[in-house]
Image (tube, coloured by chain):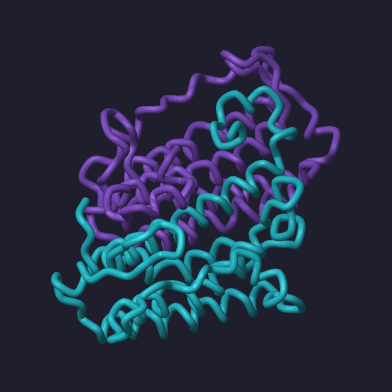
Chain colours: A cyan, B purple
Amino acid sequence: MKYSTEKALEILEQTPKTLKSYLGNLSNDWLFANEGGDTWNPYDVVGHLIHGEKTDWIPRLKIILSNSENKTFESFDRFAQFENSKGKTITQLLNEFENLRQDNLKVLKQLNLSSEQLQQKGMHPELGEVSISELLACWVTHDLGHIAQISRVMAKQYKNEVGPWVAYIPILNT
Amino acid sequence: MKYSTEKALEILEQTPKTLKSYLGNLSNDWLFANEGGDTWNPYDVVGHLIHGEKTDWIPRLKIILSNSENKTFESFDRFAQFENSKGKTITQLLNEFENLRQDNLKVLKQLNLSSEQLQQKGMHPELGEVSISELLACWVTHDLGHIAQISRVMAKQYKNEVGPWVAYIPILNT
């Protein structure tokens, strides 16, 4: 499947309401359980997605489209959510994510990027040259990857509860 | 986390609306793309979940609770959805799943299973003895596993579109 902003928007637009349905009514037993050690729980993941809306996707897109000589992105802080989410309920985080995402998608739609613009490039501090279409495709897969992560983390809480079925549920063995 | 019907219900109740949010407004490009060969697309997965509601979880629970001497489950047909989903839109499938799930959870709640009942056992045709609590915990992880699968299948459609970011999105490399 080739990148198209129209198809990318289908995924990017559903994520906030999917996460609200998925996590909005869960108790802390599900929301704050992780995979052990420093791994993230579903609450952490939502905070991470919020930080992406604030500092990653659209801010990086604007760097590429700018007239600046230096189009190197700032490094993304993968731990910002631990400070930023403090004291907030999951409902607050889900609403914050939804609002930020709506604003960002409004910007994306208004830009109405041409196929030439989608090929414009910025500089990732570690990965080197990347194009706008790669950035936007990455945004899509990043959403999907974190929905999968949330699913895996929650499923694993019942790994010891399913008995012999553990052999039949691949996600419990990843 | 120990199995409890109260916590299991939190997951089982959200799945139909999460899938509606996730898939209800997507185009066929996302819904009918798979991971190659005979692998399933998101549309197939919803059909599979429907078949589970009809033949797996509550029917097997009823076998265990019955007075029958023989508590061996029927084998689950992992391919039934290819016939049963034919000609249906994703919206029809999502509504069908929601209705079946609501009916099944009504049964589960009305049973109000005691901790003794949760330990009653049936016979899985391949796995041997399994308890009601294992069956119900499996139902939960099965939902979560298929939400993860849907996420992975859709993310992989953009594997070639993310450029060098492929190294940073674990789900693209599974």
- Where, quadrant-wise, is the N terminus of chain B in this rendering? top right
Q: Can residue B83 be seen from the camera position used here?
A: no
Residue at (20, 45) in percent of width and height = B87
Residue at (54, 54) in percent of width and height = B102
Q: Classify residue B62 as left or right of residue B81.
A: right
Residue A140's image quarter? bottom left
B114 is higher (above) or lower (below) than A21: above
Q: Classify residue A118 as left or right of residue B147.
A: left
A96 is higher (above) or lower (below) than B40: below
x and y, in percent, of residue A62 in the image? 35, 82
Q: Can residue B162 be seen from the camera position used here?
A: yes
**Which residue, as the protein is rendered here, is positioned at the far right?**
B116
x and y, in percent, of residue A165 in the image? 63, 26
Q: Nearer the viewer, residue B4 or B33?
A: B33
Residue at (25, 48) in percent of width and height = B88
Residue B135's image quarter? top right
x and y, in percent, of residue A63 in the image? 36, 80
- Where, quadrant-wise, is the C terminus of chain B in this rendering? top left
Q: Classify residue B21 as left or right of residue A121.
A: right
Figure label count: 0
B160 is higher (above) or lower (below) than A88: above
**Which residue, as the protein is rendered here, is positioned at the far front?**
A69
Q: Nearer the viewer, residue A69 or B154?
A: A69
x and y, in percent, of residue A71 in the image? 35, 76
Q: Nearer the viewer, residue A78 or A94?
A: A78
Residue at (67, 22) in percent of width and height = A164
Q: Nearer the viewer, residue A18 or B35?
A: B35
Residue A60's image quarter? bottom left
